[in-house]
Amino acid sequence: MTPRKPTRPDRPGLEHVVSTFRILVAAHSWTADRIVEALRPFGYQIDVLTDGHAAQRAISQGAWDLVIGSSDLPNLDGFLLLRTLRTSRDIAETPFLMVVSSLDPDEEVKAFQLGADEVISEATSGIALRARVRVLLRLSTYRRRLQNEKRMLGIKVAERTRELMEITMATVAALEKATELSDPETGHHILRVATYSALIAEEMGLSAEFIEKIRLYAPLHDVGKVGVPDRILKKEDVLTPDEFEEMKRHTQYGYELLAAARADAMACNIALCHHERWDGSGYPNGLKGEKIPVEARIVAVADVFDAMITVRRYKAAIGPDTATQIITVEMAPRFDPAVLGAFSRRYDQMLEFFRSYR
């Protein structure tokens, strides 16, 4: 059914009144005529539909400032029409005025429960109707303004988030380079650890955001080594107990460096806690079990695996299968069982990546 367009105001002195407000009236023809007559002097753009299904389609397709529906609308009553409006995400905030046959308390309560902004009866005076419509149109204006402001704020937040991510990526790249310069052996190591960590996180069913973050920040796990003296960092023999104590401080150095740079909490957690152990035997704080951040628990396994299967100046490499056996059996108490399970299930992919980036 095509909406019926009422004639323009015919009262002297009001012919020039034109409003940009769009109102949909969904009611029996006699109710609609009365509403239109009451609102005509204000020049509102009013469309009239006397069939519920047609009104439902019009609501879904148009941008209305106000919908006026009658409880006894043919084919789809005003209550169902109101429910349609309130459950449609893009138009749910559109004001709705319900017209009931009489001010039956049950119908009035039902209308408000479904989300009506105002309820009147067919006996409501034209003056009262106009007053309520003006209030609801102001409400529509405020809601639309808030929606526009929210949309603009969302755009600004997205832009700022993009800028911060670009800054973060540049900072991460710079810190990765600093790590490589301080310890040339870590070049491919940090890339492999990042990929291993992402694969484990994915296997554990963690969120896409978490996976991307751990891929981004895992390479910073040893950034604190820039604070470790070269005589220790580049020593080709086993470290003495005192030297090892100094080496252990790289976790604290990394945390302080990233915290000073206002890095993401995940980056800070990884740098500080990737040498903590599930059984509490790790460092620097001897954290145990789930007190260790999950991102650090994941990087811990990825880091140890890659360290074991690569040559270092102070040790030879061991085979990946042997390393996996040691990690999942002999060293198992050190690591989160859930992380070890995910590690084992993604072992083939890790091995393939290792062979590509040796």
Image (cartoon, rainbow, N blue to C red):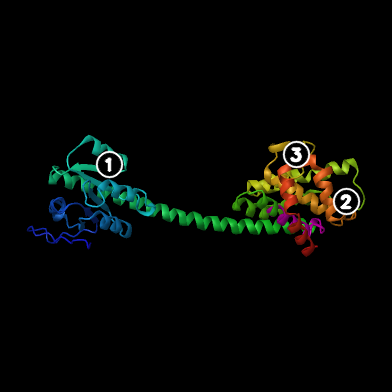
User: What kind of residue is marked 2?
Assistant: Arg
Please identify the residue farthest to the left as the structure is shown.
Answer: 12
Tell me: 312 left or right of 93.
right
Camera-near label (1 vs 3) is: 1
Q: What whole-number distance in Å separates the C-alpha atoms at marks 1 and 2?
A: 79 Å
Q: Is residue 354 magenta?
A: no
- Image coordinates of residue 311 in percent, x first then y, are 87, 57
Q: Residue at x 66, y 46 (%)?
A: 259
Residue 254 seen in the current view: no
Which residue carries the number 1 mark?
111
Looking at the rendered structure, the kind of residue marked 3 is Trp
Residue, x 29% and y 50% (percent of image)? 81
* x and y percentages locating residue 252 in the rendered image: 74, 43
197 vs 74, nearest the viewer: 74
Q: Quadrant of the N terminus?
A: bottom left
Tag in front: 3 or 2: 3
Disc 1 secondary structure class: helix
Q: Residue at x 65, y 47 (%)?
A: 266
Quadrant where the C terminus is found in the figure = bottom right
- Residue bounds of the magenta highlight: 182-198
- Closer mark to the observer between disc 1 and disc 2: 1
Which element type, helix, strand or loop, lies under badge 2? helix
Q: For this view, does 68 lie left or right of residue 182? A: left
Q: Is residue 284 above or below residue 301?
A: above
Residue 108 x, y percent position in the rendering: 24, 38
Q: According to the image, label 3 marks what residue? A: 278
In primary-sequence order, the first of circles 1 and 2 is: 1
Q: Is residue 204 above or below residue 17?
A: above
Callout 1, which amino acid? Ala
- Would you say residue 186 sits in the magenta stretch? yes
The residue singled out by tag 2 in the image is: 231
Q: Label 2: how many residues lie within 10 Å, few (<14), some (14-19) or many (20+)?
A: few
